[in-house]
């Protein structure tokens, strides 16, 4: 499953660098910045997905930067530059039939979440920054055939209506993934994305021997949001950052088993060989937390954000 999450990008041909496209403004006037996000405005912002697809196809990294924020901006920075060195650009299906979850006005903090049901359920988070709407996270495809049905509005994960349990969801992942012995007591269901990721983190160093592989898991600081569920539950949208550091084994000057493929190496570093590697991956997550505090991953996506040959 985790391997499939890494394989969301499809191959695309080499393109010519664009001089930059004009990205239309989609936000309200500064005077209206504190008003409620209306559905019509959310519909218009959702159409940015098509513009973002065009920008990726044309390798227009300036437009990718203007159309994204938070996790998607991190995933679109050096990764977009890497497509100009032949790394396949990401492609995605055209999402439709969205349902919008609009928060109450909260000063200048304007955002909304969406659940697109076609061609398969996927979650999105949009934020209003620097005078325009931007995609902060998405698509985050639902695991399995369905997606939990939010029944309430969209709120920050630390909103009192979600209780403490929603605010602590990202920290539960961090504790779980950095505690292979399980002494913390944090657990996830068998087959959950988090459980499979923990297994991978423990297994991966053995697969690259004699190379040495170190990992560091961190929270991706940003706008964690929640969608209210029945019986006091919530869906929490958040993200993790995983850094891999691969070094040659004793007596070696090069890596025996690079953890990333030739397209990634060439795109990010300009060469298919590297004496050492440091790669950073972003894991986007939608987590269901029940009214009783039980957590499980309902949607996930994973991508390589940066790769350097140290």
Image: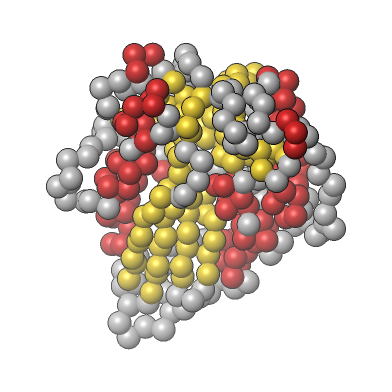
Question: Up-down: is 186 above or below 211?
Answer: above
Is 269 left, or right, of 283 in this rendering? right
| Residue 145 visible here | no
Quarter of the view holding residue 108: top right
Q: Residue at x 74, y 27 (%)?
A: 44
Tally of marks: 0
Image quarter where the N terminus lies is: top left
In the foreground, 122 or 225: 225
Q: Residue at x 33, y 38 (%)?
A: 168
Q: Residue at x 44, y 20 (%)?
A: 228
Q: Position of residue 117 (x, y in %)?
A: 58, 20
Q: Position of residue 293 (x, y in %)?
A: 27, 27
Q: Position of residue 66 (x, y in %)?
A: 72, 48
Question: Up-down: is 116 above or below 151?
Answer: below
Is 19 left, or right, of 263 in this rendering? right
Question: Up-down: is 268 above or below 150?
Answer: below
In the foreground, 54 or 220: 220
Question: Up-down: is 209 above or below 283?
Answer: below
Quarter of the view holding residue 288: top left
């Amino acid at each position: 499953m985790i391997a499939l999450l890494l394989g969301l990008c499809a191959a695309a041909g080499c393109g010519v660098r664009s001089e930059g496209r004009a990205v239309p403004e989609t936000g309200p006037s500064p005077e209206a910045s504190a008003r409620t996000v209306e559905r019509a405005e959310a519909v218009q912002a959702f159409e940015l997905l098509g513009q973002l697809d065009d920008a990726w196809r044309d390798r227009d990294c300036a437009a990718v930067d203007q159309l994204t924020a938070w996790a998607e901006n991190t995933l679109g920075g050096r990764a977009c530059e890497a497509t100009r060195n032949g790394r396949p650009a990401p492609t995605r299906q055209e999402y439709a039939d969205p349902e919008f979850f609009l928060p109450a006005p909260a000063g200048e903090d304007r955002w909304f979440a969406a659940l697109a049901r076609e061609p398969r359920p996927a979650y999105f988070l949009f934020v209003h920054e620097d005078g325009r709407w931007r995609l902060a996270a998405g698509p985050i495809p639902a695991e399995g055939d369905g997606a939990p049905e939010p029944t309430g509005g969209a709120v920050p994960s630390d909103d009192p209506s979600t209780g403490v349990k929603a605010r602590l969801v990202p920290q539960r992942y961090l504790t779980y993934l950095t505690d292979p012995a399980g002494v913390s007591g944090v657990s996830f269901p068998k087959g959950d994305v988090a459980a499979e990721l923990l297994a991978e983190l423990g297994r991966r160093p053995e697969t690259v021997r004699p190379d040495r592989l170190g990992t560091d898991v961190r929270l991706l600081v940003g706008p964690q949001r929640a969608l209210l569920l029945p019986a006091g539950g919530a869906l929490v949208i958040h993200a993790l950052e995983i850094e891999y550091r691969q070094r040659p084994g004793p007596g070696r000057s090069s890596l025996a088993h690079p953890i990333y493929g030739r397209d990634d190496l060439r795109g990010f570093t300009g060469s298919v060989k590297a004496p050492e590697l440091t790669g950073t991956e972003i894991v986007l997550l939608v987590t269901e937390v029940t009214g009783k505090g039980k957590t499980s991953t309902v949607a996930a996506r994973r991508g390589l954000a940066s790769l350097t040959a140290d």
